[in-house]
Image: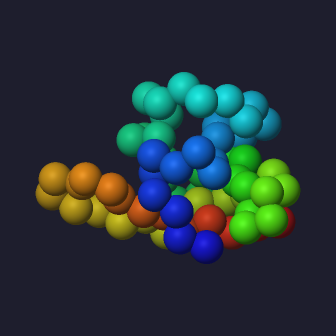
Amino acid sequence: MSVSIDSDKIAPYLSKSEPEEWRAALTKGDKIDAMDKCGTWYESTVIEGELRPNPTFPTIKVGFR
């Protein structure tokens, strides 16, 4: 699943909270909590990120466990 890093469908690992600073630092292999299309939260891993010079809405690929 690809999600924007400012999406409310991801949260810091084991927190499901809304702080914003952690989003910009997400890298491949980071553990996060992510919500699937049905609204269920899962422990997940960042599989791939999208790098842009001036990211307006960068996205990441999330692997659900």
Q: Residue furthest left?
A: 53
- Residue at coordinates 22% horizontally, 61% vertically from top-left? 52
Q: Is residue 24 visible?
A: yes
Rendering colour mode? rainbow
Identified at 72% across, 48% down, the residue is 33
- Tell me: 55 left or right of 62: left
Quadrant where the image shows the C terminus: bottom right
Quadrant containing the N terminus is bottom right
Can residue 31 be seen?
Answer: no
Residue 4 versus residue 64 in the image, above or below: above
Given residues 33 and 25, the one toward you in this image is 33
Q: Locate residue 17: give its quadrant.
A: top right
20 horizontally vs 31: left or right: left
View extreme (bottom): residue: 1
Splitting the image into 4 quarters, where does residue 21 fall? Answer: top left
- Residue 15, x across and y down, in percent: 74, 32
List x then y, in percent, for residue 28.
52, 60
Query: Where is residue 25 shown, x and y percent of the image?
Result: 43, 41
Is residue 56 depicted above or below 65 in this figure? above
Asked if residue 1 lies left or right of residue 42, the reply is: left
Name the residue rendered at 52%, 63% in the picture.
3
Q: Quadrant of residue 16?
A: top right
Residue 6 versus residue 18 in the image, above or below: below
Tally of numbered tags: 0
Q: Nearer the viewer, residue 51 or 4?
A: 4
